[in-house]
Structures are given as C-alpha cells and as structure tokens.
Image (cartoon, helix red, strand yellow):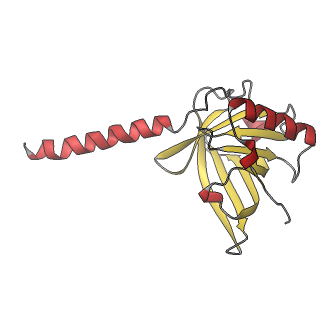
Amino acid sequence: MNTFQKIAIPVSLGVLGLMIFNSCSVGIPKGAVAVNNFNADKYLGQWYEIARFDYKFEKNMDNVTATYSLNPNGTIKVQNRGYNYVKKEWKESVGEAKFVNEKNEAQLKVSFFKPIWAGYNVIDIDEDYQYALVAGNSLKYLWILSRTKDIPDSIRQRFLEKARKIGYNTEELIWVKHNQ
C-alpha cells in the first residue's frame, strides 16, 4: 500500500463518518412536525427556559435564557446563559443555528462546537410568539420556552399533551427556577 492510500483511506472514512453523524443528529423525532409558516424574525429575541430534561450541558442550572439574533450572514446567533447554583457562577454558550430546509419551516440545526450540529425543531408556538415547544433530534431533548419567567397553565398543558403524544416522558422534565 502506498503512502497516499495509507493517508487517503482513513481520512475518507473519517469524513464519511462525520457526514453520517452530522446528518443523523439534525433530525426530528418520529411523530413530531416542525411549525410551518414560521416567522424567524418574530422568534428572535430573549426566551426563558421554563422546562427541560436533565442534560449534562445544563446540569445544576437555573435562570436559563436563550437569546436569538440575526448574524450578518443570515444565520441565527444563539446565546444561552444560565446560573450554576452548585458552582455559584454564570455560564454562557454561544452558537449558530441554520434552517435545515426553507426559512418558513421551523426545523433548524444548531452548533456550539462545529462541525457537530444538533436538531432544533420548534414543534408548537402560539400565534403571538410568546411560548414555544422545542424538540431536539430525539426523545432525549425537549424544551418549553417563554418570553416571560412563567407560562399560563393552558399553554403548559397544551405543550405537555403534545409532547406525550409524540412519546416524550414529560414526568422527567425539570421545571427551571427564575429568581434573578
């Protein structure tokens, strides 16, 4: 085997593996449908995280917010911020989101560590863009977001029912505290 083959084969397999991993991680759970007629401009701004599953990247966090703004290149800047109440410190993570298909379909992919992308799918939103239900790429990822630090019970129940029908175990949701 010549030197070129010794280098080209592992590199090609690595690139192929990364492409497969990348495409698999930006999907949407079976039974979930991204919002159509989505208005990204109305979605921009600050959101409070109301509920989530216990993810290691948000472990021991309260006062969690997500702020979305438009980047000059047309992608969306994602700025997540929260307070780690164990370490007693604020944490922030900045990433980028892109639409998977058309801009009026709320199926996006988000990256905080390129080239790794994950699914970000708005699967329910009220008509005034005040409350959103967001699914990741699998039943392991779910968020309930609000423009304010709380959410009306009617919206909460609507989102929980929708999540349950898709297959989410909503009993495992963590209800985020906002005391700042």
- The number of callouts visible is 0
Q: Residue at x 47, y 35 (%)?
A: 23
**Could you say which is closer to the camera, residue 58 or residue 147?**
58
Residue 34 percent coordinates (x, y): 68, 29
From this viewpoint, which residue is outermost toward the bottom?
A: 88
The quarter in which the C terminus is drawn is bottom right
From this viewpoint, which residue is outermost toward the left?
A: 1
* Figure quadrant of residue 101: top right
Q: Is residue 145 above or below residue 79?
A: above
Q: Residue at x 87, y 54 (%)?
A: 149
Residue 129 percent coordinates (x, y): 83, 37
**Could you say which is closer to the camera, residue 174 or residue 20?**
174
Q: Residue at x 74, y 24 (%)?
A: 37
Q: Residue at x 36, y 40 (%)?
A: 17
The quarter in which the N terminus is drawn is top left
- 60 horizontally vs 5: left or right: right
**Could you say which is closer to the camera, residue 82 or residue 40?**
82
Residue 80 percent coordinates (x, y): 68, 56
Q: Is residue 176 above or below residue 5?
A: below
Residue 96 percent coordinates (x, y): 59, 47
